[in-house]
Amino acid sequence: MNLGDLGGFLFEQPLLSLTILAILLAVGAGMIAASRPRLGRAMRNTAYLGLVAALLLTVAELAGHNSRSEAALWLDATRPAEIVGKETVVAMRADGHFWVEAELNGEPVEFLIDTGATYTGVSRRIAEKVGIQPDVEDRGMILETANGSIVARRGTADSLRFGGIEANALTIAIGPDNEVDTNVIGMNLLSQLAAWRVEGNRLILTPKARTART
């Protein structure tokens, strides 16, 4: 391997290059420490910072490849939906589910898109934050969740928007704070769409065409 090949290889391996450079700095610092202590100390400290940075970047890279790690979930934060043509695309997160950042009554709320949920649901805290009140005449309804059965109250959201999807006057199930830890978009919204499908790691939602007003 000539110098050109070696340079190209190191250019493609930035973590390895950073580690080698830090080691060389540490060795150089030891060689000149006696004659030039200040420069040697500065080189040694720089070498330590380089090694720490290489270690942290390596941990982050490994976490990103391990989709089940907590670090991977933290790094893979929920993002707004993407609009592609007339369709709205939601990317799968590292936990294998489809999460989306939506606007509920104009306020940002993180939702899990759950095709097994009958209603779109939020916790009481989120409902109060966005101004959704339980219907006065509603006596509550029993919903099945991952944590078991809960009693939820019906409310109405003025709007729920994400990507090119918008639902108005949408029924919302308001659950107790201590029993609801995930806000979900359910079938009462998805059923209003023209179509939805999963392709690989993407959930693709197609809104119904808007009828022209006369």
Image (cartoon, rainbow, N blue to C red):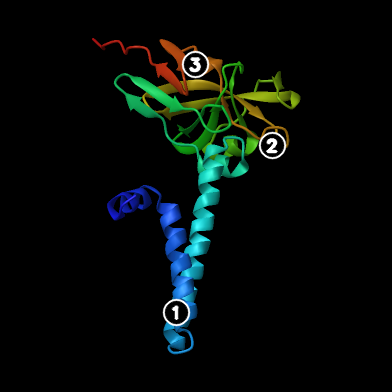
Secondary structure of the residue carrying tag 2 is loop
Residue 195 lies, in percent from the top left, at: 43, 11
Q: Earlier in the sequence, mark 2 or mark 3?
A: 2
In this view, 163 is above or below 31: above
Q: Residue at x 60, y 15 (%)?
A: 118
Residue 34 lies, in percent from the top left, at: 48, 88
Residue 28 lies, in percent from the top left, at: 44, 75
| Residue at mark 1 to residue at mark 3: CA–CA distance | 60 Å
Secondary structure of the residue carrying tag 3 is helix
| Residue at mark 2 to residue at mark 3: CA–CA distance | 24 Å
Q: Is mark 2 in CB contact (under 8 Å) with mark 3?
A: no
Can you identify the residue that label 1 sits on? Answer: 42
Q: Name the kind of residue labelled 2 in the image.
A: Asp
Residue in the foreground of this view, choosing between 199 and 138: 199
Q: Is mark 1 in CB contact (under 8 Å) with mark 3?
A: no
Q: Is mark 2 in CB contact (under 8 Å) with mark 1?
A: no
| Residue at mark 2 to residue at mark 1: CA–CA distance | 54 Å
Q: Earlier in the sequence, mark 1 or mark 3?
A: 1
Q: Residue furthest bottom?
A: 35
Can you identify the residue that label 3 sits on? Answer: 190
Can you identify the residue that label 2 sits on? Answer: 177
Q: Residue furthest right?
A: 148
In this view, 124 is above or below 184: below
Residue 101 lies, in percent from the top left, at: 47, 34
Q: Name the kind of residue labelled 3 in the image.
A: Leu
